[in-house]
Image: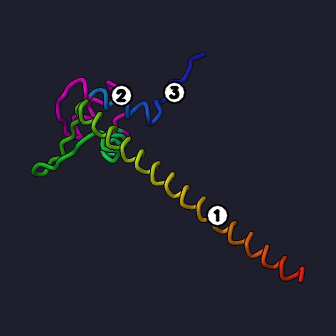
Amino acid sequence: MSKSKKGLSHDEKRKRLLEYFHETGDFFQLKELEKIGPKKGVVAQSVKEVIQSLVDDGLVTTDKIGTSNYYWSFPSNTANTKRIKFEELQNQVQSKRDKKEELQKAIEEARHGRESSVKKKNKKSAK
């Protein structure tokens, strides 16, 4: 029985192409990447989609020069992108913590206001 080859996941394809960019330190056109892709285990038909997802995530840079699009990525770019993303996430976490604290104070104030109104009602009922 022959085992059928199992294709790579999208993340694995991204990883392999990104590693290739970092290994070579060069820039490429899409046609070149479509030829290189199969050597890295990425079918030529999915190279464009994978490259676009890397561009969308800021891991690969693209620039249109004349009528051609060039793609490149350096390890330092990836580190900077990850650092910036990390800082953004830290800021989001801090803002969520601040919002949580603000809401907890509002809840506490509402409870305190409710307790005092209940005490006033009880005093009126007792009279």
Helix, strand or loop under label 3: loop
Given the image, on which type of amino acid does mark 2 rest?
A: Arg
Magenta-highlighted residues: 21-46
Foreground tag (2 vs 3): 2
Where is mark 1, residue-wise? Answer: 107
Residue at 40% across, 49% down: 91
In percent of width and height, residue 17 lies at 32, 31
Given the image, on which type of amino acid does mark 1 rest?
A: Ile
- In front here: 122 or 55? 122
Q: Marks 1 and 2, how far apart in space?
A: 51 Å
What colour scheme does the image use? rainbow
Q: Is residue 27 left or right of residue 16?
A: left
Q: Is residue 122 left or right of residue 86?
A: right
How many C-alpha atoms fall within 10 Å of the one at disc 1: few (<14), some, or many (≥20)? few
Q: Are marks 1 and 2 in contact (CB under 8 Å)?
A: no
Given the image, on which type of amino acid does mark 3 rest?
A: Lys
Where is mark 3, residue-wise? Answer: 6
Task: Examine the image and state in which quarter residue 90 appears.
Answer: top left
Q: Marks 3 and 1, how far apart in space?
A: 54 Å
In percent of width and height, residue 1 lies at 61, 16
On whether residue 44 falls in the magenta region, the answer is yes
Q: Earlier in the sequence, mark 3 or mark 1?
A: 3
Q: Are marks 3 and 1 in contact (CB under 8 Å)?
A: no
Q: Is residue 94 left or right of residue 75?
A: right
Q: Marks 2 and 3, how far apart in space?
A: 16 Å
Where is mark 2, residue-wise? Answer: 16
Task: Examine the image and state in which quarter residue 87 appears.
Answer: top left
Q: Main secondary structure of the magenta part?
A: helix
- In front here: 18 or 81? 81
